[in-house]
Image: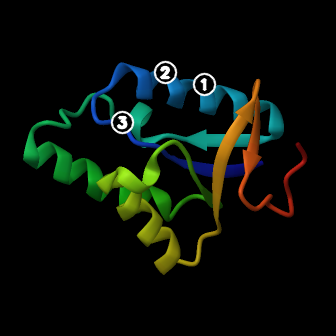
Amino acid sequence: MKKAYIAHPFQGKKSNLEAIKHICKSLVPFGIMPISPVLTFSFMNDKAPEERSKALEFCEELVETCDCLFLTGDWEGSEGCIVERNVALAEMIPIFEIVGWSGDKPFFKKVPSWWKG
């Protein structure tokens, strides 16, 4: 089972939270253990600078424990997603971008060689 870090913008938006839940749930049948910092650190206040900084620090460490990173949603417009991507690049953790969905099946920009979808 692959542990995939899910990098998706949150910005306190309920629609992003629902999208993240959908993404995580949709990946499980494909043998993926989704690791979402949004769901994991939901107890932290993203609007409090000290807590946001600490959460980003946690995210950086969490990325390093995963087999790959999945970029989803409007990740390019998210400071947190950029930080997570940079950590994956520095640690040479494979990065895959999910560019769309057909029902519960993701479409990748470049399909992972181990993907069984």
Residue 113 lies, in percent from the top left, at 86, 64
SS for dot 3: loop
Given the image, on which type of amino acid does mark 1 rest?
A: His
Write the residue at 40% across / 42% down.
9
Mark 2 packing: few (<14 Cα in 10 Å), some, or many (20+)? few
- Count of numbered circles on the image: 3
What's the amino acid at mark 3?
Phe
Q: Which residue is mark 1?
A: 22
Q: Are marks 3 and 1 in contact (CB under 8 Å)?
A: no
Residue in the image at 65% along x and 47% along y: 99
Residue at mark 3: 10
Q: Secondary structure at mark 2?
A: helix
| Residue picked out by circle 2 | 18
Label 2, label 3: how far apart the Cα atoms are: 10 Å
User: Which quadrant of the view contains residue 117?
Assistant: top right
Quadrant in the rendering for residue 23: top right
100 sits to left or right of 16: right
Q: Residues within 10 Å of mark 1 (few under 14, many from 20)?
A: few
Lower position in the chain sequence, tag 3 or tag 1 = 3
Label drawn at residue 87: none
Give the alpha-carbon distance from disc 2 to disc 1, as whole Å: 6 Å
Q: What percent of the width, then of the height, locates residue 114? A: 86, 59
**Residue occupying image coordinates x 78% and y 48%:** 1
Mark pair 3, 1: CA separation: 14 Å
* Residues under numbered marks 2 and 1 in contact, where contact means CB atoms less than 8 Å apart: yes
**Residue 47 in the image, given as x and y percentages of width and height:** 13, 36
> Which sits earlier in the primary sequence, circle 2 or circle 3?
3
Q: Are marks 2 and 3 in contact (CB under 8 Å)?
A: no
**Horizontal relation, residue 23 to residue 109: left or right:** left
